[in-house]
Image (spheres, rainbow, N blue to C red):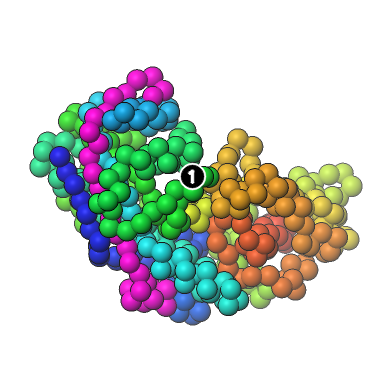
Amino acid sequence: MIGLVDGAPPVTVDTAEYVRLLGFPRGHVMAGRALELAEWARTWYAGHGRPWVYAQEVASLSVSPGLVRMGETVFRSPRLERVLRDAGAHGAVLVAVSAGPELERAAHEAWLAEKPDEYFFLEMFGSAVVEHLTTTAGARLCGWADAEAMAVLPHYSPGYPEWDINQQAALFSLFDRDELPGRIDVLESGMLRPKKSLLAVFGLTRHVDRVRPLTGLVPCEGCSFTPCQFRRAPYSRAETPVREAVEVAETRGPDYMTSTNALRRWADERLTLKTHDDGSIDAVFRYDGSTCSNMGRALAFEYRVTLGPRTAGFPIRSQMCRPSEGDDGYRSMCEFARVGDAFVADIERDAPVAGRPLADVFSWQRPRLGPGCFCEPESRQHKWGLVLETIHYALTHGPRT
């Protein structure tokens, strides 16, 4: 049996992971105000943060179609069941990590003090801390398992695809709470407090031969702990030094708030344009982001904009944002947990530049940065700015529409 209690784990957040969570383009090297804020958040947390990690092995594990039983508690997660079954898992380790309540309080104070940049960088650093703690906990488990001729499977948590977040409380009930180095509360919505926390299940298998040929069962591809001696596959987000050099040389147009390298990529990969006989244009942009709590649940939104013809200055006739069809990541956002579908209706009603020429996006006063979620109006305005700038770039730098 393995047990792990660490009330003061070292935290060395990988810069590339922090940059990714901040929403910068892949391989981007921060400079100026962004670098200043990033270093401030890192320094603040080093002096005030109180992270912790806890792990315990479950008493028993059994898997049947659609069901996973841990001890006397039954969970319904088809995906977790498939992973455990395919790997021939015989056991599991429960892991709880938290960046601590201090960061959450400091971020809230920054927001109340009308310091959105400081709030955002602290929030994202908290998410990076949770990722780091989960990653290093997995690495420690791999070390123990390797000595026991076992392999550790990728972690999975309530709120991930095919595991309802409402089962968070049931999972938490399996933990020996008296042994936790810090406090975690599970709200009725399934969200955790402090929100920069995570409960996870790491499966265990003695069938190491099954893990190696099945990429989906190897946690290494999602693990940024690059010096790990037990690595079975390369980290999928690894960057090459050449890419970093290219991104440093990125150029900005005279008006765009976003780098033209990012706008060019988004125009190619995320935007579709359809021109009608009367010159009007329908633009559809897909946004992929993540929530700011529970280690960031993936979410996808679709932006739809109707523009008048070029000769009229591309007037914005309508704009709307809604969750992408088939994606329910928005349900993991704090604001949805608070007000439900009324939150989605607020997002759909947002139309901050409707009725104005598309070029007015450059004179529109909006936040330069915003978290990946949609909970705050400022965050939604920031994303609308990205979308409209991408549309403008595509229409003025691509083939004439």
Report the residue that reaches farthest toward the left: 147
- In terms of image quadrants, where is residue 400? bottom right
In the image, residue 56 lies in the stretch drawn in magenta:
yes
338 and 45: which is toward the camera: 338
- Residue shown at 66% from the left, 76% from the top: 254
Q: Does residue 23 lie above or below 153 as drawn?
A: below
* Foreground residue among 325 and 112: 112
Q: Residue shown at 63%/41% (left/top)?
A: 324
Image quadrant in which you'd find residue 72: top left
Closer to us: 338 or 343: 338
Judge whether residue 23 is colored magenta: no
Q: Quadrant of residue 355?
A: bottom right
Direction from residue 369 to residue 356 in the image, left or right: right
Would you call the spot at circle 1 few (<14 residues within 10 Å), some (14-19), or many (20 or more)? Answer: many
Q: Amino acid at mark 1?
A: Gly
Q: Position of residue 340 (x, y in %)?
A: 65, 45
Residue 310 visible, this orientation = no
Q: Nearer the viewer, residue 383 or 111?
A: 111
Specify the segment rendered in magenta: 39-67
| Residue at x 76% of width, y 45% of height | 274
Residue 238 picture location, percent across and down: 34, 55
Could you tell whether 4 is left or right of 265 in the image?
left
Most extreme residue toward the front, as rendered?
A: 178
Q: Is residue 395 visible?
A: yes
Say which residue label 1 marks: 190
Q: Position of residue 168 (x, y in %)?
A: 43, 41
Q: Residue at x 47, y 72 (%)?
A: 106
